[in-house]
Image: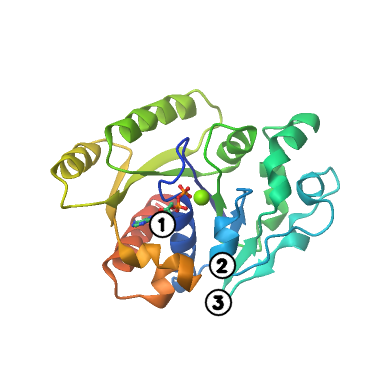
Amino acid sequence: MKIIASGSIKGGVGKTASAVNLAAEATRWGARVLVWDLDPQGSATYLLRVEHRLAGRGARGLIAADATLGRHVRATTVDGLHLLPSDRSLRFLDLHLDAGGERHRRLADLLRPLHDAYDVVILDCPAGASLAFEGALRASDVLLVPVIPSTLAVVTLTQLEELVAARAPRPELLAHVSMLDRRKPLQRQIADSLLERPDMLTAVIPNSTAVEQMGPERGPVTSFSPGSVAARAYRALWRELSDRLWS
Ligand SMILES: Nc1ncnc2c1ncn2[C@@H]1O[C@H](COP(=O)(O)OP(=O)(O)O)[C@@H](O)[C@H]1O
Ligand SMILES: [Mg+2]
């Protein structure tokens, strides 16, 4: 089982779009896939048409000493893709992680029993450097960081690289260009310089109305518009990422 955290300190950069589309792409490839929506906003839960609610005691019960994640897992409309849904109580997840012991290891410990049930787990992280994010870093093989081509996003990527480098054990940080608008020269220029960095994947996700349509369609772009430029880009991103994961 490989664990990918789709995360960034920044919000609105395409973490959830990547998590959902890559998960769908991984199922097409034959993998058994779980998306864990760790964001109280529940965007992945919404896009995958699952109720925004955890059974039992919400976030507190989710990570309690006697917790099993399996009871919260739901099937989605995408074959082979399961979801551990978000709940509004996840906004207190950091408090519960802090109160329970081994706060950095808790998410990794909870995921361990699922090892034989899934080939790929994608953690859709909330923005920010929270305890939940630290836990996701600890649990993951790869931290996948979508980077929009703007100066401040590049600054944030450098901060994230430093944050991850200071962790042990740490995931491999891999980034990708997200929401590139090729009509804008500055964006093209920043994307080109990003692609020279060693931790960048070469697949670029364009700014695309097909990705925006995920909201009204409530599904992965690879399902409702498989021939779109965006779907092809996510397919290329998954190929590259899976090559790195299983090389
Ligand atoms: N490649 C893209 N092209 C156009 N819009 C996008 C793209 N990726 C994401 N979006 C839109 O940007 C917003 C933020 O995306 P999202 O994946 O939720 O970001 P995050 O999870 O990082 O907060 C959403 O409204 C989404 O539809
Ligand atoms: Mg999100």
Look at the numbered disc 3 and say if its residue's Cβ is closer than 8 Å to ligand 1.
no
Between circles 1 and 2, the one closer to the viewer is: 2
Establish if 18 lies above or below 135.
below
- The numbered mark, 1 or 2, whose residue comes first in the sequence reads 2
Structural distance between the alpha carbons of marks 1 and 2: 22 Å
Establish if 60 lies above or below 215.
above
Q: Position of residue 57 (x, y in %)?
A: 83, 51
Q: Position of residue 33 (x, y in %)?
A: 56, 64
Structural distance between the alpha carbons of marks 3 and 1: 19 Å
Q: Residues within 10 Å of mark 2 (few under 14, many from 20)?
A: many
Q: Colour scheme in the image?
A: rainbow
Q: Residues within 10 Å of mark 1 (few under 14, many from 20)?
A: some
Image quadrant holding the N terminus, namely bottom right
Q: Quadrant of residue 239?
A: bottom left
Which dot marks residue 48?
A: 2
Q: Hey, what amino acid is under mark 3?
A: Asp
Disc 2 is placed on an element classified as loop
Between circles 3 and 1, the one closer to the viewer is: 3
Q: Quadrant of residue 109?
A: top right
Q: Hey, what amino acid is under mark 2?
A: Leu
Which dot marks residue 242?
A: 1
Disc 1 is placed on an element classified as helix
Q: Residue at x 74, y 55 (%)?
A: 69
Give the left or right position of residue 151, taking residue 124 as reference: left
Structural distance between the alpha carbons of marks 3 and 2: 11 Å
Q: Hey, what amino acid is under mark 1?
A: Ser
- The numbered mark, 3 or 2, whose residue comes first in the sequence reads 2
Q: Residue at x 52, y 33 (%)?
A: 170
- The numbered mark, 3 or 1, whose residue comes first in the sequence reads 3
Q: Position of residue 30 (x, y in %)?
A: 49, 72
